Structures are given as structure tokens and as C-alpha cells.
Image (cartoon, rainbow, N blue to C red):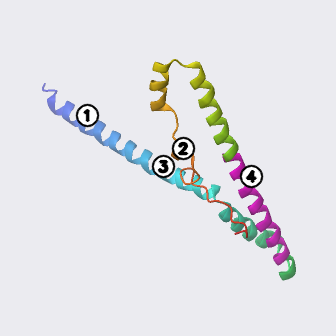
């Protein structure tokens, strides 16, 4: 009995399964990443909360205006907190880098230079965060 045709069929089925799994992983990863980005957008959160509040509580027009002002203020405060947190985190990283560099020999510092973050690596653009404008959103 010749096993070669069976091995070819098995190899093709395995290739199909691997390709399908890879495609599913890539699609799922992209969907999950975009969902996470959508959830992290404070403007989307503001709009979602306003819609849900309107649907469930049904405030009057006057109440809706005042409540939206509260939501807008909260979004501005959350954006400020996010920026402060990023700034504080960046400072911790730079202090860590400085502390580690003091412990290294000159030869080790050269090697460490390749792995330590560059200032451009820790900007708001890289972190996908918009600076808060002074006048608000």
C-alpha cells in the first residue's frame, strides 16, 4: 500500500488548518486592537455615556445640556490625568535609565546605549495621546 497520497493529503490539510488559524489570529488581533483603541478614546466614551443616559434616564432638554457640560468637564479632567500619568511614567523611566547607567562599566554603557529608550520613543505621538487644549474639546 502506497502511503505517499495519504501523506500529501495530510500535509495539505495541515497547511489549510495552519493558514486558517493564522488568518483567524490576524483578523482577531486587528479587531481586538481596534476595539481597544475605540474604548480608550475619551470622546467615544463621552458620546456613548450621553446616548445611554438619554436612552435610559430620558432627561429634559435643560437637564441634558447641564449633564453634557458635566460629561465634557469629566472628559477634560480624564485627559489631564492621562497626560500627567504619561509624564510621570516617562520620568520614572528616565530615572531608571540614569540609575542603571551609574551602575555600569563604560563597556556595559555602550551595550546599554543600544537598548535604552530614545527621547522620541516616549512622546505623546508614539503613545497615541492628544495633548489637552487649554480651551477644552
Please tell me which of labels 4 and 2 falls first in the chain: 4
State the residue position of label 3. 28
Q: CA–CA distance between discs 4 and 1?
A: 56 Å
The N terminus, quarter of image: top left
Please tell me which of labels 4 and 3 falls first in the chain: 3
Q: Secondary structure at mark 1?
A: helix
Would you call the spot at circle 4 few (<14 residues within 10 Å), some (14-19), or many (20 or more)?
Answer: few
Please tell me which of labels 1 and 3 falls first in the chain: 1
With respect to residue 113, does 56 lie above or below?
Answer: below
With respect to residue 28, does 50 lie above or below?
Answer: below
Q: CA–CA distance between discs 4 and 2?
A: 21 Å
x and y percentages locating residue 84 in the rendered image: 72, 49
Residue that appears at 59% across and 19% down: 103
Magenta segment's dominant SS is helix
Q: Secondary structure at mark 4?
A: helix
Q: Which mark is residue 119?
A: 2
Q: CA–CA distance between discs 4 and 3?
A: 31 Å
- Are the two marked residues, 4 and 3, in contact with CB atoms closer than 8 angstroms? no
x and y percentages locating residue 78 in the rendered image: 74, 56
- Identify the magenta region: 64-86
Amino acid at each position: 500500500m502506497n502511503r505517499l497520497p495519504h501523506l500529501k493529503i495530510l500535509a495539505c490539510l495541515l497547511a489549510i488548518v495552519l493558514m486558517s488559524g493564522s488568518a483567524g489570529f490576524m483578523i482577531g488581533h486587528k479587531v481586538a486592537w481596534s476595539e481597544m483603541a475605540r474604548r480608550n478614546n475619551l470622546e467615544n466614551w463621552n458620546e456613548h455615556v450621553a446616548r445611554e443616559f438619554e436612552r435610559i434616564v430620558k432627561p429634559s432638554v435643560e437637564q441634558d445640556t447641564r449633564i453634557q457640560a458635566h460629561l465634557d468637564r469629566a472628559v477634560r479632567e480624564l485627559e489631564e490625568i492621562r497626560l500627567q500619568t504619561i509624564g510621570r511614567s516617562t520620568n520614572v523611566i528616565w530615572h531608571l535609565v540614569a540609575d542603571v547607567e551609574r551602575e555600569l562599566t563604560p563597556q556595559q554603557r555602550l551595550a546599554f546605549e543600544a537598548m535604552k529608550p530614545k527621547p522620541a520613543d516616549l512622546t505623546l505621538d508614539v503613545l497615541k495621546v492628544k495633548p489637552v487644549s487649554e480651551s477644552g474639546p
